[in-house]
Amino acid sequence: MTRFEICIDAEKSSIVPETLVTARGTQRRGTVAAMAKASAVKFFVPCCILIWLINEPVFAQPGEFRAARYKNMPYQLFEPEDLSPGDRVPLVVGLHGAGKRNMPISKVLMKFHTVPADPEFQKRFPCYILAPKTSVSWFPEEIKEPGWTPGQVAKLPDYWKKSYAKVIDQLAKPPENGFGEQEILFELIDELLGQNKIDATRIYIVGFSMGGSGTWQAVAARPDFFAAAIPAAGGRLFPWQWNKEVLSVPLWAFQGSEDDVTAAERHQTLFEYAKSIGGNMKYTEFEGAGHGITDYVFTPSGEIRYDGQYKTSLSGTACDDQKNVWEWLFSKRTPGHR
């Protein structure tokens, strides 16, 4: 279950290079700052040059992840190899779950980061991959109460009818530093768009657990920005955020029916609403599966791999019936380009 916690790291800085890591997240080089200091000792580099080096925006090396920091948000960025000057390729933004909030940046990578970084995958779908890290959550810093009447609450699905009072109580007691870091995430994405050969019509966002809920929240905040989204085991989109604009974004949600961390009812109720308005949501539920479903979804081939029973449902005619996860994702573009 998503928890709101105060951000410990209040440091504010520009994009700062940190480490170079492989697609599997292992450290390959020391920090740029440390290397700069060593050079200063050996070659007497002036202090002013060191300061410039430490604060210079970082560019990923082709074919590998490079770790850096934007303000108080560490991240890893993968840049595809062999791009020509005029090339523009997609960006995949992958949001981790709550279990990685206190891990080092080298441990933040998940299946939806490492699988697309594989050389064979890149031949099929060249793309940038962003792996940001939050120590709080992917929610916005502020979340306003909807001010719904008892009559409006009474019309909600049973799950949300029972949960509504608890959610409102949480929103009435915001943490000192805010609920989450969504705004910093958006600033980082915008910064990277200006620095790299990214196709602005093909920005995809995926996430697991807390990151799955963060995926929904990102789409709700910028429905015209993301070309498609894959939330897995995380359906915390509040009922007052449900609308046709959000559910018109191509979405493919995945959920374990026996998930005891993120209730399946969240995605189930969202899907029922999407059906009622003819939205563009696909929903796959793994019968008997618990919370950890990323291995079933984000396979190298893109084919769903699950030993048990599962069912994929479409919310309406706007959905396509593509069964390959990666083929589905990389075929999407933002409105006006689809």
Image: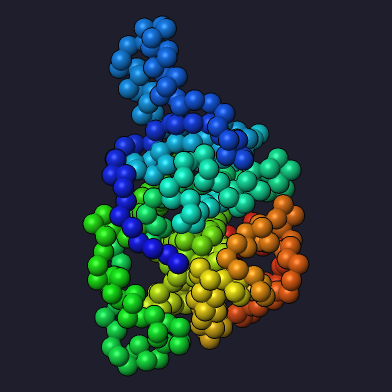
User: Where's residue 171, x and y in %?
Assistant: 29, 70
Residue 225 lies left or right of residue 122; in this view the side is left
View extreme (front): residue: 260
Residue 282 in sight from this viewpoint: no
- Residue 221 visible, this orientation: yes
57 or 167, which lies in front? 167
Residue plotted at (60% across, 52% down): 112
In this picture, is 122 found above or below 47?
below
Q: What's the residue at 36%, 29% (across, down)?
A: 55
Front residue of this view, candidates 228 and 286: 286
204 with respect to 311 (left or right): left
Report the side of 72 relative to 83 (left or right): left
Vertical position of residue 7 compared to residue 309: above or below: above
In the image, residue 123 sits, relative to residue 231, either above or below, namely above
* Residue drawn 42% across the image and 22% down it: 34
Residue 277 position within the rendered picture, expressed as x and y whole percent measured from the top left: 52, 83
Q: Residue at x 54, y 75 (%)?
A: 264
In front: 161, or 93? 161
Q: Quadrant of residue 120?
A: top right
The quarter of the image holding the N terminus is bottom left
**Quadrant in the picture for residue 11:** top left
Toward the top, the furthest residue is: 43
